[in-house]
Image (cartoon, grey):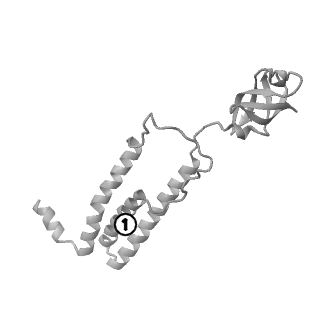
Amino acid sequence: MGDLNAWWTGLSFSLKFYWILAIPFTLFFLLQLFLSFFGGGDVPDDTPDAEIDADTGIGFQFFTLKNLIAFFTIFSWTGIACIDSGLSETTAGIVAFVAGLIMMLIMASLFYFLAKASGDGTMKFKKAIGKSGQVYLTIASKRSGVGQVQIKVQGTLRTLDAMTDETDNIPTGTMVMVKEIVNENVLLVTSK
């Protein structure tokens, strides 16, 4: 304990400042990293699912708790490294501040692009309107029965229920085009 006390009293004011920031923010950063990988992200089973087409999210976020923790972690360790390498306190402060800002920018960009890259995988039937597909199971005429079509929607080939307003049945193998959506999950098609 005496060695630690002697080390601490031998430090300059600026090094003490950087060490006071480095220790807690490094612990917060490691805790944040641990929780990101191993927990803290579960949603209870009774949480209702909702899809809101107008909700586009916040987008690029620079000042967040995670970014501030990262800023002070990098800021403090860069300041310590700069002073230990012989740079002046002013130069060390400027370099540490710039390094912290760069870290915040990297983290904000990372979370922004990860959020844009994620998808929920939910099939949105309205995206099938105007698309062409092939009849998989015969579609009965005048909406008298449900058949199936194979159609590529959202980059995936899907087999979906379909009806038609045409006077004749549409046999298997016929190319069709989606006109609209019926009953939320049944396509209304017409032969091409």
Answer with left or right where residue 94 lies relative to residue 116. Answer: left
Q: Residue at x 47, y 58 (%)?
A: 107
x, y percentage for residue 136?
A: 77, 23
Can you say whether 45 is above or below 15 in the image? above
Q: Amino acid at mark 1?
A: Phe
* Secondary element at image label 1: helix
The C terminus lies in quadrant? top right
Residue 149 x, y percent position in the rendering:
76, 27
150, above or below 114, in the image: above
Picture coordinates of residue 50, whole percent (x, y): 55, 41
Left-right relation of 123 to 18: right
Q: Does the rendering let one see residue 17?
A: yes
Q: Is residue 55 left or right of residue 29?
A: right
- 33 and 92: which is toward the camera: 33
Q: Nearer the viewer, residue 152 or 110?
A: 152
Which one is in front, 152 or 5? 152
- Residue at position x 61%, y 37% from top? 122
**Residue for point 41% across, 66% down:** 100
Q: Which residue is mark 1?
A: 75
Say which of 88 and 14 sits in front: 14
| Residue pictured at 23% horizontal, 75% vertical | 13
The image quarter in which residue 26 lies: bottom left
Query: What percent of the width, then of the height, locates residue 145?
Result: 77, 20
Q: Quadrant of residue 179?
A: top right
Look at the image and tell me whether residue 88 can be seen.
no
**Residue extending furthest left?**
2
127 to 96, vertically: above or below: above
Q: Residues within 10 Å of mark 1 (few under 14, many from 20)?
A: many
Image quadrant where one finds the N terminus: bottom left
